[in-house]
Amino acid sequence: FLSGKRALVTGSTSGIGLAITRALHAEGAEVVLSGFGDEAEIAKLQEELSAPYSGADLSTVDGVAQLMEEAGNVDILVNNAGMQFVAPVEDFPPEKWNKIIALNLSSAFLTSHHAVPYMKKAGWGRIINTASAHSKVASPFKAAYVAAKHGLAGLTKVLALELAEHNITANCISPGYVWTPLVENQIPDTMKARNMSRDDVINKVLLDSQPTKKFVQPAEIGAMAVFLCRDEAQNINGANWSVDGGWTA
Ligand code: NAD
C-alpha cells in the first residue's frame, strides 16, 4: 500500500532503523538508507532494498542538510538515528552530552525542517520518531539520552499540532529494550557504572524494567511504523506509542 511513497529512515544501516526500512520496503515504499557501518554490508543492503545510501553524520547541522539533499523529497520521515552513553552525571563528558542532544534530538528537528515543505505540497506525510521508554521515564546514568528523548517527545507533539491540517501526522514509537547493537554495546559501561556482572546487567537492570522479561524484536517496531503509515492511522497524531512490554505502565 506504500508504492509511490518514498521513505527515509535515519540510522537505517542497523537495528531498529533497518527493521523499519525493511517493513516499509515490504509494503512497496522506495527507501533511502542512512547511517554508518561496514562498506560491504551497506552495499549488500543497498542491493537487497534497491536503495540509495547516505553516510552523512547527523550529529551536525551540515550533515543533516547533506542527507536531505541526497535523499530528495520524502513522504515518510522516520527519525531513528541515535546513540547512548552511560555514566554518572559528574563523570559525564560534556562533549558526549552535546553529541547525544545533537543526534538524538536536534537531527529530528532539522530533518523535519527540510522535509515538511514537500509533504505540505504533496498533501500527505508521516513523521515517525523513534523515541524510547526513556521519553516517558528516567533511569540513572543516562542524563543526555533521557533529556534528548523527552525533548523528542515534545518536538513530536509540536509537529503534530502544526501539521495536522495538512494530512501529515507526527508520532513517537517508544521501545523498551530492543536487542540491537545499541543495547549490547552499553552493557560493558553499565557493568562499570553499577559494578555488576554481564548477566546481572542483562537480568537485573535491562530486563528488570521490562515486565514481559523479553527483549522487544526490531521487527515489532517495523510493524508499528507500517501501521502509522496506513490511512486508518490518519487520526493518530501527536501520540507516543509504548512498545516496552509494560515497562512504563
Ligand atoms: P543501532 O546502534 O543498532 O543503530 C543506530 C543507527 O544510527 C545506525 O544505523 C547508526 O549507523 C546510526 N548512527 C549512529 N550515529 C550516527 C550519526 N552520527 N549520523 C548518522 N547515523 C548515525 O541502535 P538501535 O538500537 O537500532 O537504535 C535506533 C533508535 O532506537 C535510537 O534512536 C535509539 O535511541 C532508539 N531506541 C533503542 C532501544 C533499544 O533497546 N535498542 C530502545 C529504545 C529506543
Image (cartoon, rainbow, N blue to C red):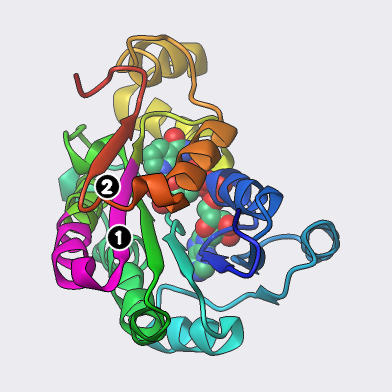
Taking the spot 29% from the left edge, 37% from the top edge, the residue there is 241
Q: Residues within 10 Å of mark 1 (few under 14, many from 20)?
A: many
Magenta stretch, main secondary structure, is: helix
Residue 165 screen position, x and y as percent: 20, 70
Spatial CA distance of label 2 from label 1 is 7 Å
Q: Is residue 85 visible?
A: no
Residue 89 screen position, x and y as percent: 17, 46
**Foreground pick, 66 / 77:** 77
Taking the spot 29% from the left edge, 17% from the top edge, the residue there is 246
Amino acid beneath label 2: Ile
Residue 244 drawn above or below residue 141: above
Residue 79 drawn above or below residue 84: below
In the rendered image, residue 163 lying in the magenta stretch gets the answer yes
Q: Tell me the tag on residue 79.
A: none
Taking the spot 20% from the left edge, 66% from the top edge, the residue there is 164
Confirm or deny contact between disc 2 and disc 1 (CB under 8 A): yes
**Foreground pick, 28 / 243:** 28
Taking the spot 69% from the left edge, 61% from the top edge, the residue there is 37
Amino acid beneath label 1: Thr
In the rendered image, residue 188 lying in the magenta stretch gets the answer no
Task: Compare marks 2 and 1 and give the one earlier in the sequence.
Answer: 1
Dot 1 corresponds to which residue?
169
Residue 7 screen position, x and y as percent: 56, 66
Q: Secondary structure at mark 2?
A: loop
Q: Is residue 237 visible?
A: yes
Which range of residues does the magenta coloring cover? 154-173
Residue 54 drawn above or below residue 204: below
Q: Quadrant of residue 129?
A: bottom left
Q: Quadrant of the C terminus?
A: top left
Dot 2 corresponds to which residue?
236
Q: Quadrant of residue 158?
A: bottom left
Query: Number of labelled discs?
Result: 2
